[in-house]
Image: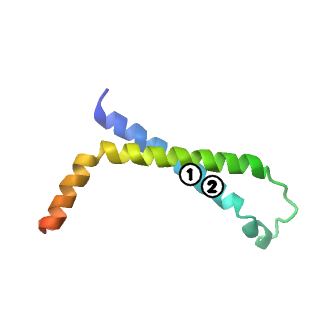
Amino acid sequence: MNIQVVKWCVDLALGIAFLFNAVTGIVKLMVLWRIAGFSEIVLPVALISEVHDRSGVALSILVLVHLVLNRAWILSMTKKILAGTAWT
């Protein structure tokens, strides 16, 4: 399989995991719901917490995979920045 396709798939999965984590994290903030006046809404907090936790783990693993796949670029840019040649 082409490495660019693998990187694209990992980045897509990262985006999806981030969206799940961000949305469930915001929903878990019940204070925002009360401030907005939605105190009567009953949410499945246990399910939301489970999705939030699992998407957080997936996000962490995908970030590690992303860093491993892009380690050559990261090291190259670090060397350029430390050498002062990144901006030329």
Where is residue 73? Give x, y as percent.
Answer: 23, 50
Quarter of the figure with residue 87: bottom left
| Left/right of residue 42 with respect to residue 66 in the rendered view | right
**Mark 2: which amino acid?**
Val
Classify mark 1: residues with Cα within 10 Å, few (<14), some (14-19) or many (20+).
some
Residues at marks 1 and 2 touching, judged by CB atoms closer than 8 Å: yes
Q: Nearer the viewer, residue 2 or 78?
A: 78
Quadrant in the picture for the N terminus: top left
Where is residue 32? Give x, y as percent.
Answer: 72, 69
**At 56% across and 51% down in the image, what residue appears?**
19
**At 68% across and 46% down in the image, what residue appears?**
50
Where is residue 26? Give x, y as percent.
Answer: 65, 61
Give the CA separation, mark 1 to mark 2.
6 Å
Q: Is residue 16 visible to us here?
A: no
Q: Is residue 79 visible to us here?
A: yes
Disc 1 marks which residue?
19
Disc 2 marks which residue?
23
**At 34% across and 48% down in the image, what residue appears?**
67
Tell me the tag on residue 62. Answer: none
**At 75% across and 69% down in the image, what residue appears?**
31
**Mark 1: which amino acid?**
Leu
Vertical side of 70 occupied by 26: above or below: below
Secondary structure at badge 1 equals helix
Q: Looking at this rendering, what residue extends furthest in the right direction?
A: 40
Where is residue 76? Give x, y as percent.
Answer: 18, 54
Quarter of the figure with residue 68: top left
Q: Nearer the viewer, residue 75 or 31?
A: 75
